[in-house]
Amino acid sequence: MKGHQIKGFALAAAIAAVALTTLAPSALAQSASAASLGLPSGNGRELVVRACTSCHQADKITAVGHTPDQWDQIIGKMIDKGAKATDSEQDQILNYLASHFPAKIATTNH
Ligand code: HEC
């Protein structure tokens, strides 16, 4: 019945609208924390914020997962570009990134 379908659609739209408005404030609160956006707390987080978010935001880092080898290469590349971190700081950054942003393939089982 036509009327029934429209009612169902309106209900679904209302639910979606409620879901959106309840999600929006937390998304805004997150982006308010500026450069540290999306970085979970943990050992090395402060280093990443300091050394890795001066040229670009943290979303460049959080967007894609990598293997430890790949992170190692990326950190080396960023050091070449001008990122400031000592060898031991780079180790901590590598540990942090490798444990929080691992390669996606490692977790998907086909
Ligand atoms: C001196 C500026 C600068 C600093 C500091 C810096 N980056 Fe970058 N980063 C860039 C630029 C520029 C790009 C994009 C261009 C490119 O990839 O060559 C980029 C891109 C990236 C990317 C995207 C993938 C890629 O390889 O292009 C990742 C991941 C990344 N940076 C991680 C980091 C991490 C982790 C740190 C801290 C160790 C860091 N960046 C510090 C300049 C910087």
Image (cartoon, helix red, strand yellow):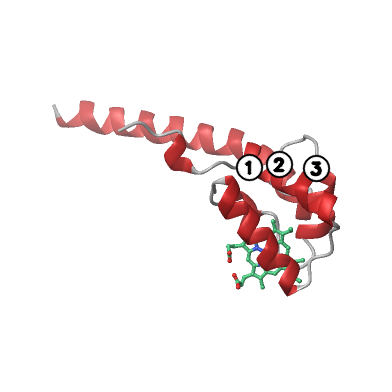
Residue corresponding to mark 1? 98
In the drawing, what numbered circle is on residue 3?
none
Question: Callout 1: helix, strand or loop?
Answer: helix
Marks 2,1: beta carbons within 8 A:
yes
Separation (CA) of disc 2 from disc 1: 5 Å
Rendered residue at 62%/49% (across/down):
62
x and y, in percent, of residue 108 in the image: 39, 34
Q: Residues within 10 Å of mark 3 (few under 14, many from 20)?
A: some
Nearer-N-terminus badge (3/2):
3
Quadrant of the frame with the N terminus: top left
In the drawing, what numbered circle is on residue 95?
2
Foreground of the two, 68 or 33:
68
* Amino acid type, mark 1: Ala
Question: Callout 3: helix, strand or loop?
Answer: loop
Q: Eyeballing the image, is 67 above or below 10?
A: below
**CB of mark 2 near ligand 1 (< 8 Å):** no
Q: Residues within 10 Å of mark 1 (few under 14, many from 20)?
A: some
Rendered residue at 68%/39% (across/down):
25
* Amino acid type, mark 3: Gly
In the shown orientation, is residue 101 left or right of residue 14? right
Marks 3,2: beta carbons within 8 A:
yes
x and y, in percent, of residue 91 in the image: 76, 48
Quadrant of the frame with the C terminus: top left
Q: Eyeballing the image, is 37 above or below 10?
A: below
Q: Eyeballing the image, is 55 above or below 89?
A: below
Residue corresponding to mark 3? 44
Nearer-N-terminus badge (3/1):
3
* Amino acid type, mark 2: Asn
